[in-house]
Image: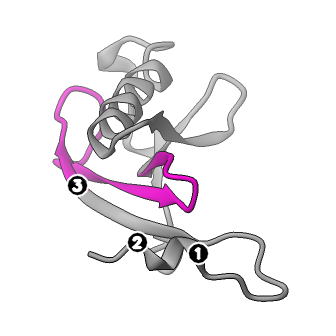
Amino acid sequence: MSENWKHIKINGIVGIDKCAAEFNVWEQNYSPYAKFKIKVYESAEGRFTGFSNLHVIDSGGYFNCAVGYGKTIEEALADTIAYFFQLVSWKDKQDWKEEDFTESDPFDF
């Protein structure tokens, strides 16, 4: 695939990221769902950032998605999964309930 998109410059546009990959991640120990998704985006500078569509409640009552970074798609994916496990580490496995999770709006993800 061409890398020409990285050089597009349009007045009023401050950045363009490409969805480089989308993954189904199967997890059964914490979340009430069989799977969640991670999308990895590439910046025009060649950096990769992963985002989960599954959001986890924190000890303050706020929901956070897992975010990870890397020099490759695989590094960003692994970092995002690792961060998901950090997000759920503040409670024991058996204490997580369905209401402790929410998903990104499909329009946004």
Near mark 2 (Cα within 10 A), the count class, few <14, some 14-19 or many ≥20, is few
Q: Which residue is mark 3?
A: 23
Outermost residue, right side = 12
User: What number is the disc on residue 7?
Assistant: 1
Left or right, 12 with respect to 28, comes to: right
Q: Earlier in the sequence, mark 3 or mark 2?
A: 2
| Residue contact at pointers 1 and 2, CB within 8 angstroms | yes
Q: In the figure, 14 relative to 70: above or below?
A: below
Q: CA distance from mark 1 to mark 3?
A: 27 Å
Q: How many marks?
A: 3
Task: Point out residue 85 in the picture as x, y percentages from the top left corner.
Answer: 38, 22
Task: Point out residue 92 in the picture as x, y percentages from the top left corner.
Answer: 38, 11
Left or right, 79 with respect to 68, comes to: left
Q: Earlier in the sequence, mark 1 or mark 3?
A: 1
Q: Is residue 33 magenta?
A: yes
Q: In the figure, 25 relative to 37: above or below?
A: above
Task: Point out residue 49 in the picture as x, y percentages from the top left corner.
Answer: 48, 47
Q: Nearer the viewer, residue 11 or 18?
A: 11
Mark 3 or 2, closer to the camera? 2
Magenta residues?
Answer: 23-52
Q: Which residue is mark 2?
A: 3
Residue in the picture at 27% in, 61% down: 22
Residue in the picture at 16% in, 48% down: 34
Q: Quadrant of residue 1?
A: bottom left
Amino acid type, callout 1: His
Residue in the picture at 49% in, 63% down: 104
Near mark 3 (Cα within 10 A), the count class, few <14, some 14-19 or many ≥20, is some
Task: Point out residue 73 in the picture as x, y percentages from the top left corner.
Answer: 31, 46
Q: CA distance from mark 3 to mark 2?
A: 22 Å
